[in-house]
Image (cartoon, rainbow, N blue to C red):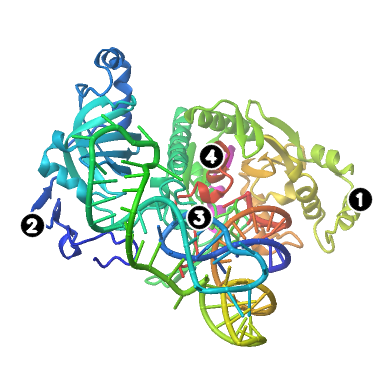
RNA sequence: GAGAGCGUAGCUCAGUCGGUAGAGCAAAGGACUUUUAAUCCUUGGGUCGAGGGUUCGAGUCCCUCCGCUCUCACCA
């Protein structure tokens, strides 16, 4: 017996348990000393490419009757998902990324030498099949093999063939197995690429440029979050992994790239939860001479285009919740919602502080807007079913946002909420360098530096001093958007390789 | 960070009142030319998460630790 401690995938038929990778071929040696040299398959037809032309073969099926094998010649390649050997006849269920198809291998049909290959087959192996399309006695579409090509051996045993791999940790740790054996998982990630492609198409339609900013920052600005620290040896320089894309994209606005975006990874050294992964994908986009109203329209377009790209209508299921994405989404001001949910005058700081105490928050030494914000998060956010744009935030909470004309205490900012989850955040961008510098300097009382977006970035201020056009800016949490559009309950279900502890 | 649940064969899971470690799938040998999670016969496979304790005896009871999942709290 072989050396594999788990599945005994090897036996003496594969001499010395050797699976040798050669330049562009893999060689297996049989017990009879026969060497099977396995060339790469030049072309293959995808399984759905075999199924689709069936429309044209309706007549063919009717005329031929069951058990006939004179359909079109096809070549397919894929992984063995099921295998049912019945003596001199072997049925395989073969899977490629487009679907599953049955293969029938008859000893008489492929010849003794070729049939010997079936003795080497295991679940999970990759094989290529030449054959004719036909139907079995039970009417199942089947490739009746005329030739087998043994392409790749799998050395690890597959998961249980009916239940599959269900342990959430193992599914994330061995995503390659999850993708192979859980078709829902493959489908979710296929939808992810479609949504991301759709976003790029939508923005290209508005003339946006896609750019790449630095991920190593000297100042981790643009958001309120704890950064990962790192260090550049040659320059002996401390660096942070970026927590947002904002400040470099705005520099590009100054430079005259008037519609610009980056979709990329940001890193936040914070907790892990079904809605949080330490690295996640964000898109931030900036549109010169636009404002936050423009950004609301664009947000709706990005989402509805994403729905279309995944073949969905406006009504979407998310777990046992329903989401109605029919645009336009509700637009309500921060103060309106505050008053509605708390029955307190949003301008009465004393009453708000008293209410904060009543619900167990400590307003001591905090700026009134911070207290108001804490009450808002506690009492309002969770009740937002949405999709709803919450607009016009207290400006002291928004150091990067333009103030409303004639109403400096209100910032032109919105956040998009769906079932209590924050999905997007957008501003009419602050382009006043003097005010920006001032806001970077003054930390809000009661806020730790990591909790504040206000971090001095002198080069960014210098950029603003060169003149940034008025602009609308938008950030969307891509992973969360994908959760909503793929009915995934955890961010880990839409990130291929979420952060995991060391394997023990 | 707090609470609840879980951890047994490669995978999916049973394991009663504390009394010899179980099943299905997978693997190995055999039979079978129309199977559908094929079927039938045979065989091998275990640090019961780790450590300690109680007991004549612990997968089972107790303690500590590790890991995972869910819920709640916080960053998006």
Q: Looking at the image, is mark 4 or mark 2 earlier in the sequence?
A: 2
Q: Looking at the image, is mark 3 or mark 4 earlier in the sequence?
A: 3
Q: Looking at the image, is mark 1 or mark 4 earlier in the sequence?
A: 4
Could you tell me how far apart the alpha carbons at marks 3 and 4 are, in whole angstroms? 41 Å
How many other residues sit within 10 Å of disc 2, few (<14), some (14-19) or many (≥20)? Answer: few
Q: Which image quadrant: the N terminus of chain A? A: bottom left
Q: Which mark is residue A167?
A: 3
Q: Which residue is mark 1?
A: A351
> Which chain does tag 1 point to?
A
Could you tell me how far apart the alpha carbons at marks 3 and 1 are, in whole angstroms? 50 Å
Q: Position of residue A464 (x, y in %)?
A: 56, 48
Mark 4 vs mark 2: same chain? yes
- The residue stretch that appears in magenta: A458-475
Could you tell me how far apart the alpha carbons at marks 2 and 3 are, in whole angstroms? 41 Å
> Which chain does tag 2 point to?
A
Nearer mark to the viewer, of 2 and 3: 2
Q: Which mark is residue A286?
A: 4
Q: Secondary structure at mark 2?
A: loop
């Amino acid at each position: 017996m072989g050396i594999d401690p788990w599945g005994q995938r090897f036996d003496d038929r594969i001499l010395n348990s050797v699976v040798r990778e050669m330049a562009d071929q893999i060689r297996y040696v049989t017990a009879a000393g026969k060497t099977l040299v396995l060339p790469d398959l030049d072309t293959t037809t995808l399984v759905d490419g075999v199924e689709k032309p069936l429309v044209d073969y309706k007549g063919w099926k009717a005329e031929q009757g069951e058990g006939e094998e004179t359909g079109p010649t096809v070549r397919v390649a894929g992984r063995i998902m099921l295998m049912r050997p019945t003596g001199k006849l072997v049925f395989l269920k073969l899977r490629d990324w487009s679907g599953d198809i049955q293969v029938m291998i008859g000893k008489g049909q492929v010849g003794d030498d070729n049939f010997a290959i079936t003795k080497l087959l295991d679940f999970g192996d990759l094989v290529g099949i030449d054959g004719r399309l036909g139907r079995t006695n039970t009417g199942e579409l089947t490739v009746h093999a005329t030739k087998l090509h043994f392409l790749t051996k799998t050395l690890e045993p597959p998961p249980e063939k009916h239940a599959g791999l269900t342990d959430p940790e193992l599914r994330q740790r061995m995503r390659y197995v999850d993708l192979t054996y859980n078709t829902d998982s493959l489908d979710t990630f296929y939808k992810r690429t479609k949504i991301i492609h759709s976003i790029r198409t939508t923005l290209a339609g508005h003339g946006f440029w896609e750019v790449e900013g630095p991920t190593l920052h000297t100042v981790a600005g643009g958001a309120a979050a704890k950064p990962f620290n790192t260090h550049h040896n040659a320059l002996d320089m401390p660096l942070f992994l970026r927590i947002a894309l904002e400040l470099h994209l705005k520099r590009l606005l100054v430079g005259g790239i008037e519609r610009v975006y980056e979709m990329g990874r940001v890193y936040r050294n914070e907790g892990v939860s079904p809605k949080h992964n330490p690295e996640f994908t964000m898109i931030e986009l900036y549109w010169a001479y636009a404002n936050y109203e423009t950004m609301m329209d664009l947000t709706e377009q990005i989402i509805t285009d994403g729905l279309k790209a995944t073949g969905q209508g406006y009504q979407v299921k998310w777990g046992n919740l329903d989401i109605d994405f029919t645009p336009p989404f509700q637009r309500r001001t921060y103060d309106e919602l505050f008053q509605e949910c708390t029955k307190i005058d949003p301008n009465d700081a004393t009453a708000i502080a008293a209410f904060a105490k009543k619900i167990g928050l400590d307003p001591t030494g905090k700026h009134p807007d911070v207290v108001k914000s804490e009450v808002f998060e506690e009492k309002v956010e969770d009740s937002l079913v949405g999709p709803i744009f919450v607009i016009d935030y207290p400006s002291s909470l928004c150091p990067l946002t333009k103030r409303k004309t004639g109403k400096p205490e209100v910032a032109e900012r919105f956040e998009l909420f769906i079932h209590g989850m924050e999905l997007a955040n957008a501003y009419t961008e602050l382009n006043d360098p003097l005010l920006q510098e001032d806001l970077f300097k003054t930390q809000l009382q009661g806020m730790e530096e990591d909790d504040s977006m206000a971090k001095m970035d002198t080069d960014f201020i210098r950029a603003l001093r060169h003149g940034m056009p008025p602009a609308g800016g938008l950030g969307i949490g891509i992973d969360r958007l994908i959760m909503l559009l793929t009915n995934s309950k955890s961010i880990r279900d839409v990130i291929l390789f979420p952060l995991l502890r060391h394997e023990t």
